Image (tube, rainbow, N blue to C red):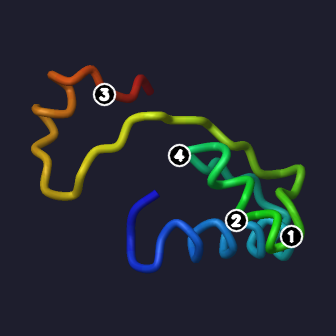
């Protein structure tokens, strides 16, 4: 959910790309926030999957610290 002008620009861009390019996209973050932003862009297209994540890893947080807090991704 991070980045410049995020999460608004990321979600809107993903919705536009999903409609235009007919690709599959996964958005990971706070589901309610993603859905709220996507509603402004015409809703979430069927080729977007939203993966809810409660936890946030700060940009300045060491990866090891996030893992110690129990935040990790299983591939």
Secondary structure category for the residue under label 2: helix
Q: Residue sitting at 53 percent across and 46 percent down?
A: 29
Tell me the distance, in whole angstroms, between the alpha carbons under discs 3 and 4: 13 Å
Question: What percent of the width, then of the height, locates residue 32?
Answer: 67, 46
Q: Distance between the Cα atoms at labels 2 and 4?
A: 12 Å
* Residue visible at 38% across and 29% down in the picture: 73
Residue 41 picture location, percent across and down: 81, 74
Q: Taking 63 as reference, is 61 above or below it?
A: below
- Circle 2 sits on which residue? 37
Relative to 6, does residue 65 appear above or below in the rendering? above
* For residue 73, side relative to residue 15 (left or right): left
Image mark for residue 4: none
How far is the residue under mark 3 from the one under mark 1? 32 Å
Look at 39% across and 35% down and name the residue there. Answer: 55
In the drawing, what numbered circle is on residue 71? 3
Judging depth in this view, the residue of 34 and 25 nearest the camera is 34
Horizontal and vertical percent position of residue 62: 10, 44
Q: Which of marks 3 and 2 is in front?
A: 2
Give x and y (percent) for residue 19.
Answer: 86, 70
- Camera-side mark, 3 or 1: 3
User: Is 71 positioned to the left or the right of 18 in the image?
Assistant: left
Determine contact: label 3, label 2, CB under 8 Å: no
Give the label on residue 19, or none. Answer: 1
Disc 4: which residue: 29
Quadrant of the snapshot with the C terminus:
top left
Q: Of label 1 and label 2, which has the lower sequence position?
A: 1
């Amino acid at each position: 959910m991070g980045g410049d002008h995020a999460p608004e620009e990321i979600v809107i861009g993903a919705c536009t790309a999903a409609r235009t390019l007919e690709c599959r996209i996964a958005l990971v973050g706070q589901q309610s926030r993603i859905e709220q932003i996507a509603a402004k862009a015409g809703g979430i297209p069927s080729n977007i999957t939203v993966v809810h994540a409660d936890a946030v890893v700060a940009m300045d947080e060491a990866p090891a610290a996030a893992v110690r807090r129990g935040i990790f991704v299983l591939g």
